[in-house]
Image: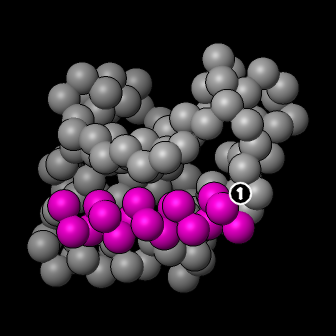
Amino acid sequence: MFRFPKNQKLCNNTDIDELFAQGASISLHSFRIVWVYNENINDVLIQSLIVVPKKRIKLAVQRNTIKRCIRQSYRSRKFKLEEHLKNQQKQINFAIIYNAHKVLSFKDIDLKINLMINRLIKTL
């Protein structure tokens, strides 16, 4: 239930380029989500990508810590999004982009990811 397997990670370069070229976005302080609908080629409803730019956070240790916190928060919250997409019979590709210049605590990241997923569900 709280897994993030390889088939749910967005790795295909053409899909990533399409996501950033044609995707819609939602912004909340420190985060931005870009998403695009995709054909349901396989039985995976969601493929996601987590981005922490080197331009904003210079140290790799801090970038990796932020990505780890985002993944943990996303893993625990994604079931709501999966249920919604299953009801709609759609598949999406999306990217979670970290926009803050400082490292936020896990509590703040978890709260903002929860808000972003709820906002994404309302938008879809």
Height in image: 120 above or below 22? below
Q: Position of residue 66 (x, y in %)?
A: 72, 46
Quarter of the image containing the C terminus? bottom left
Magenta range is 107-123
Is 115 positioned to the left or the right of 76 in the image?
Answer: left
Q: Residue at x 12, y 73 (%)?
A: 88
Q: Is residue 119 left or right of residue 75?
A: left
Identify the image quadrant of the N terminus.
Answer: bottom right
**What is the x, y in percent for residue 117?**
39, 65
Q: Which residue is mark 1?
A: 69
Please identify the quarter of the rendering in which residue 18 is found. top left
The local secondary structure at tag 1 comes to helix
Residue 72 in the image, given as x and y percentages of width and height: 66, 65
In the image, is residue 41 above or below residue 101?
below
The residue at the point 50 percent across, 74 percent down is 77
Position of 73 with respect to 13 (left or right) is right
Residue 35 image-quadrant placement: top left
Give the tally of numbered discs. 1
| Residue 76 in sight in this render | yes
* Residue at the spot 65% in from the left edge and 17% down from the top edge: 55
- Residue at the image position 49 percent from the left and 46 percent from the top: 29
Q: Is residue 100 left or right of residue 57?
A: left
Residue 43 appears in view: no
- List the single residue furthest toward the top: 55
Asked if the magenta segment contains residue 121, the reply would be yes
The quarter of the picture where residue 34 lies is top left
Tell me, yes or no, whether the highlighted magenta stretch contains residue 64: no
- Within 10 angstroms of label 1, few (less than 14), some, or many (20 or more) residues? some
The rendered magenta stretch, by its main secondary structure, is classed as helix
Position above or below: 112 against 37: below
